[in-house]
Image (spheres, rainbow, N blue to C red):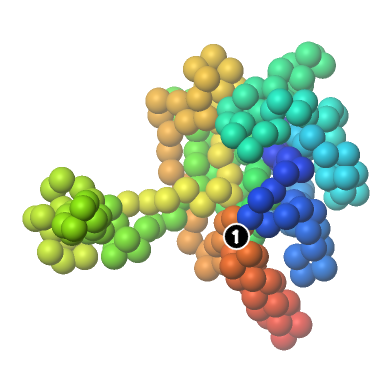
Amino acid sequence: MQLLGIIPARGGSKGIPGKNIKLLGGKPLIAYTALAAQSAGIFSRVILTTDSEEIAEVGRQCGVEVPFIRPPELARDETPMLPVLQHAVNWILSQDWNPDAIVILQPTAPFRRSTDLRSAFDLLNAHSEIDSVVSVEPVPEHYAPHFVMKIEGERLLPFMPDGLRITRRQDSPKVFSRTGEFYFTRIKTLMEENSIYGKNCRPYVVDHPHRVNLDTLDDWNEAERIVGLLGERSNQA
């Protein structure tokens, strides 16, 4: 299977200004994603799609291809991910290379493991009926939608209509949240069905303890703590 890794990293960022190339533990954030992709050994090519020449240069220094600069209309705050990916794939197809699937590798999930990337790839590669494989993590029981509440007016009500019957957290259905670490999607699903997920999306449950998705400065501080922790363990080893 020919696999194309796509790292989306636009220049504008509100929650953490300049986050894609901001130094985390002394390295640009994007370097963590580049290293995980290179270590996985499953990609035919890994490219960066960005509207920023500065980010593009950092990407090149990290060993990632930057074959084009993303047009400004695909780098707005409200721009969805789907057209960004389709633009990248259309560019690749125009160069007479036809990958079988893409993998979205968001820099905001810096602690993904190359072993997880390989295992998710094996799952997609072994089952032709699967359209996509997405990394997820369990949602804690007390945050499950069947157990949480909402306020309407002055009334406290179950968030889900059947939440009234659930009185113990352990009785709520198991639910999962996307980690943002990776999305494997077949080219046909992306380009013909206009979907990242398709009709047959399989979960890959990530269980390592260093999961973080960088949206706010609090998230960044947590990532700094994790880098320090990992550095201490490396020194002890």
Q: Position of residue 49 (x, y in %)?
A: 76, 34
Identified at 21% across, 53% down, the residue is: 153
Q: Where is residue 193 in the image (x, y as percent from the top left)?
A: 50, 17
Q: Where is residue 31 in the image (x, y as percent from the top left)?
A: 79, 54
Task: Look at label 1 and name its amino acid.
Answer: Thr
Q: Mark 1 points at which residue?
A: 216
Q: Label 1: few (<14), some or many (≥20) within 10 Å?
A: some
Tag count in the figure?
1
**Above or below — where is 40 with respect to 200?**
below
Q: Does the rendering let one see residue 230?
A: no
- From the viewer's side, name the closer residue of 176 and 42: 176
Image quadrant in which the C terminus is located: bottom right
- From the viewer's side, name the closer residue of 195 and 18: 18
Identified at 63% across, 64% down, the residue is: 217
Residue 175 relative to residue 60: left or right: left
Q: Does the rendering let one see residue 176?
A: yes
Identified at 73% across, 55% down, the residue is: 17
Residue furthest toward the bottom?
A: 236
Res 155 → quadrant: bottom left
Disc 1 element? loop
Res 67 → quadrant: top right
